[in-house]
Image (cartoon, rainbow, N blue to C red):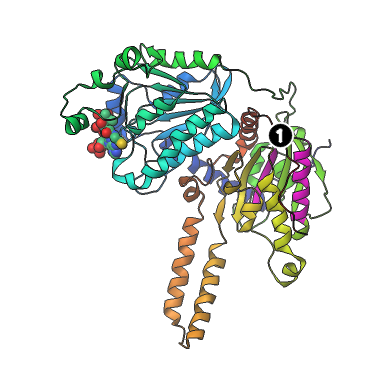
C-alpha cells in the first residue's frame, strides 16, 4: 500500500491562520475539560473528602490497570445548560480493568448527592449503549441519591430503560458489576439490584428503596440507616450484596478480581508492528479549516491518522467529492469514507458500493465527516440526487461492521445521515473543536424562513413589514448560530465528546479495539436499493 504524498505548506497563510484559530479552540477545550473535573464545587468536594471518601475520578483511577487509557465519554455533557453541572453528575468511559476493556460509570456524589439529572440520564443511556453495542463488561461505581427529584417529570418514565438494559446485557453474556460506596436510594438501589455482581463497602454503602424518613411516613416504622440498608445487612441478611468490602480500595480490588474471571473476547487482531504516520499530527491544526465554509483536502487528514500514511484509494477518479479507501490504524484494518466536498449522485453511489465491500470482508468503517449536504438544484434533482443519496443512507443504515465517526468540520442536512451521524448508531462519534452542526447554515436557514414569510404575506395580500422581517431574520440567524456550536452539541450528547484533532489516531485506535470485543461480522443483506 503506497503512502499519501502530502503537499501541505506550513508556511502558507491559510495554514498559519487555521493553526492559530484551532490552537486557541484546543486551549479552550482543555480549560473546559479541566473545569468538568470539579464536581459539585469546592464546598461539596471538601465535605466528601472529609468523610474519608475518594472522588469518582480517583475511584476510576484506582480501578484501572496501571498505565491504562481512559476514553472518557461525554465529559462536557450538560455544559451551558440550565440546572445541569458540566459532566451531568456522572463520569464514564472505556478503560482497561484486569486486562479487559470495560465501560466504567461513576456517580459524582458531590453533585446533588449523585442524583441523576435529565442530561445525566441521557449520558447513562449512552454509556449503556456503548457497553451493549461493543459487548463491554461494565463496572458501576455507585453513590447515587436516585432521581433528581425536582426534574422527575423529565426522567421518571424514560429512566426505566437503564435498568432493563443491564439485564438485557446480562442475557447477552455481557456482565455488570456494581461497587456501592455510599447512599444509593430508590433508582440508585436498582443499579446494584439489577447487576450481576454486587460489592458493598462496609460502613459506607446504604442501599434502600426508601430511606428512614420515607419508611416512617409510609408505615410508621422507626429504623436507622445501617439496619435498613447497610453493607453488613445486605451481605449477611438480604443477600443483595455478594461481597463485603472492608473499605473503598478493597471494593475496587474485588471488582478487578471479578473482571479477571471474565472470558476473553472471541477474536481480536493483535498487531505486533505498527507504522507511525509519515507526517506530524500537529499539522492537523493547520490543515482543518477554522472557518467551516472553507473546504480542505481530506487526504491530508488521512495521511496523519493511518499507519505509515498508507492508503489504498478506491475509485479515486470517480465521485471525487467522497474519498474512499482501505488503510490500517494501529494495525486494525479500516475502510475510510471521507468528505472532500458536497455529496453528488456519483459520490453517494460510490460510498454505498464501498460500504458493501467492507461488509463483505468484515472491515470496520471510519467516517470523516465534513459535509454541507447533498447538492441541490434542478439538474441534480433530475439526475436523481434523492434516489442516489438514499442508496448511501440505506447502506449506512444496514451495514453491520462497526463504524466510528469523526466530525472534522461541518455536519449539515442529510449529509449528517449519509455520513453516519448519531442517529445511524456509529459505535463511537467524536468531534473536532471546529465542528458545527445543524440542518443547514444559519444564514441559509434564516434566509429560507424570510422567503417563506414574504411569500405568505403576498398570498395573504398584505405588504411585508420590512422592519419586523429584518428583526426576525436576524434573531433566527443568531439562534441557529448558537445552536450549531460544538459545545451546544456535546452538551446534549449529540456526540461522545470533543477531542484535540492531534489525538484522533489514538481515539480511533481505542475505539476500534473496543469495537472488536464483539465479533466483527459484515452483512450482505440490505434494504431495497432504488435504481
Ligand atoms: N434530587 C435532587 N437533589 C438532591 C437529591 C435528589 N434525589 N438528593 C440530594 N439532593 C441535593 C440536596 O438537596 C443538597 O442540595 P443543596 O446542597 O443545594 O441543599 C445536595 O444534593 C446534597 O445533599 P445532602 O443531603 O446535603 O448530601 P449528603 O451527602 O449528606 O446526603 C443523601 C446524600 C443521598 C443521603 C441525601 O441527600 C438523601 O437522602 N437524598 C434523597 C435520596 C432519595 O430519597 N432519593 C429518592 C429518589 S427517587
Residue occupying image coordinates x 47% and y 38%: 125
Q: Residue furthest front?
A: 219
**Residue at disc 1, CB closer than 8 Å to ligand 1:** no
Image coordinates of residue 369 in percent, x first then y, are: 65, 49
Left or right of residue 374: residue 454? left
Q: Quadrant location of the C terminus?
A: bottom right
Q: Is residue 353 magenta?
A: yes
Q: How many marks?
A: 1
Residue occupying image coordinates x 55% and y 14%: 260
Looking at the image, which is closer to me, 291 or 195? 195
Residue 190 in the magenta stretch? The answer is no
Whole-percent x, y for residue 325 in the image: 78, 43
In this view, the residue in front, 11 or 26, is: 26
Ligand 1 is located in which of the four quadrants?
top left
Answer left or right for 134 relative to 297.
left
* Residue 87 seen in the current view: no
Q: Where 442 sits versus 109, above or below?
A: below
* Residue 515 lies in quadrant: top right
Residue occupying the point 78% across, 48% down: 353
90 is higher (above) or lower (below) than 174? below
- Looking at the image, residue 261 lies above or below residue 183: above
Image quarter where the N terminus lies is top right
Pinpoint residue 415: horizontal percent, then vertical percent: 64, 55
- Residue at the spot x=65%, y=57% of the render? 294
Mark 1 surroundings: few (<14), some (14-19) or many (≥20) residues within 10 A: some
Magenta range is 347-370
- Rendered location of residue 269, percent (x, y): 72, 25
Asked if residue 459 lies left or right of residue 363, the reply is left
Q: Which residue is mark 1?
A: 521
- 16 or 390, which is in the foreground? 390
Q: Secondary structure at mark 1?
A: loop
Amino acid at each position: 500500500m503506497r503512502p499519501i504524498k502530502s503537499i501541505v505548506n506550513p508556511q502558507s497563510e491559510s495554514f498559519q491562520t487555521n493553526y492559530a484559530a484551532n490552537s486557541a479552540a484546543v486551549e479552550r477545550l482543555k480549560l473546559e475539560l479541566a473545569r468538568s473535573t470539579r464536581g459539585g464545587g469546592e464546598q461539596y468536594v471538601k465535605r466528601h473528602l472529609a468523610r474519608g471518601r475518594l472522588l469518582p475520578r480517583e475511584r476510576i483511577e484506582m480501578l484501572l490497570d496501571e498505565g491504562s487509557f481512559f476514553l472518557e465519554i461525554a465529559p462536557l455533557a450538560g455544559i451551558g445548560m440550565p440546572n445541569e453541572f458540566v459532566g451531568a453528575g456522572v463520569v464514564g468511559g472505556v478503560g482497561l480493568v484486569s486486562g479487559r476493556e470495560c465501560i466504567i460509570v461513576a456517580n459524582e456524589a458531590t453533585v446533588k448527592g449523585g442524583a441523576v439529572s435529565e442530561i445525566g440520564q441521557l449520558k447513562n443511556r449512552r454509556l449503556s449503549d456503548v457497553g451493549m453495542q461493543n459487548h463491554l463488561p461494565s463496572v458501576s461505581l455507585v453513590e447515587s441519591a436516585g432521581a433528581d427529584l425536582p426534574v422527575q417529570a423529565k426522567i421518571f418514565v424514560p429512566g426505566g430503560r437503564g435498568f432493563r438494559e443491564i439485564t438485557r446485557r446480562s442475557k447477552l453474556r455481557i456482565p455488570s458489576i456494581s461497587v456501592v460506596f455510599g447512599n444509593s436510594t430508590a433508582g440508585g438501589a436498582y443499579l446494584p439490584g439489577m447487576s450481576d455482581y454486587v460489592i458493598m463497602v462496609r460502613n459506607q454503602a446504604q442501599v434502600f428503596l426508601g430511606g428512614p424518613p420515607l419508611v416512617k411516613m409510609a408505615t410508621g416504622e422507626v429504623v436507622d440507616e445501617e439496619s435498613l440498608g447497610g453493607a453488613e445487612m445486605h451481605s449477611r441478611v438480604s443477600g443483595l450484596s455478594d461481597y463485603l468490602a472492608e473499605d473503598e480500595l478493597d471494593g475496587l480490588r474485588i471488582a478487578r478480581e471479578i473482571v479477571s474471571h471474565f472470558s476473553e473476547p472471541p477474536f481480536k487482531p493483535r498487531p505486533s508492528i505498527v507504522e507511525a504516520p509519515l507526517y506530524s499530527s500537529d499539522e492537523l491544526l493547520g490543515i482543518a479549516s477554522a472557518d467551516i465554509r472553507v473546504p480542505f483536502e481530506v487526504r491530508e487528514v488521512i495521511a496523519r491518522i493511518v499507519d505509515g500514511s498508507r492508503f489504498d484509494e478506491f475509485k479515486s477518479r470517480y465521485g471525487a467529492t467522497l474519498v474512499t479507501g482501505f488503510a490500517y490504524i494501529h494495525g486494525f484494518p479500516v475502510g475510510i469514507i471521507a468528505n472532500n466536498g458536497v455529496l453528488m449522485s456519483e459520490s453517494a453511489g460510490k460510498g454505498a458500493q464501498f460500504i458493501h465491500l467492507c461488509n463483505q470482508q468484515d472491515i470496520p468503517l471510519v467516517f470523516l465527516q465534513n459535509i454541507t449536504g447533498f447538492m441541490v438544484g434542478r439538474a441534480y434533482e433530475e439526475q436523481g440526487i434523492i434516489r442516489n443519496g438514499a442508496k448511501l443512507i440505506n447502506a449506512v443504515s444496514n451495514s453491520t461492521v462497526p463504524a466510528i465517526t469523526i466530525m472534522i468540520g461541518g455536519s449539515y442536512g442529510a449529509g449528517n445521515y449519509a455520513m453516519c451521524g448519531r442517529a445511524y448508531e456509529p459505535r463511537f462519534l467524536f468531534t473536532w473543536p471546529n465542528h458545527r452542526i445543524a440542518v443547514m447554515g444559519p444564514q441559509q436557514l434564516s434566509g429560507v424562513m424570510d422567503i417563506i414569510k414574504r411569500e405568505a404575506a403576498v398570498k395573504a395580500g398584505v405588504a411585508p413589514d420590512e422592519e419586523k422581517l429584518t428583526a426576525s431574520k436576524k434573531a433566527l440567524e443568531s439562534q441557529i448560530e448558537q445552536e450549531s456550536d460544538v459545545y451546544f452539541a456535546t452538551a446534549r450528547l449529540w456526540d461522545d465528546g470533543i477531542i484535540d484533532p492531534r489525538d484522533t489516531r489514538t481515539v480511533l485506535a481505542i475505539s476500534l479495539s473496543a469495537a472488536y470485543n464483539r465479533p466483527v461480522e459484515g452483512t450482505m443483506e440490505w434494504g431495497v436499493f432504488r435504481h
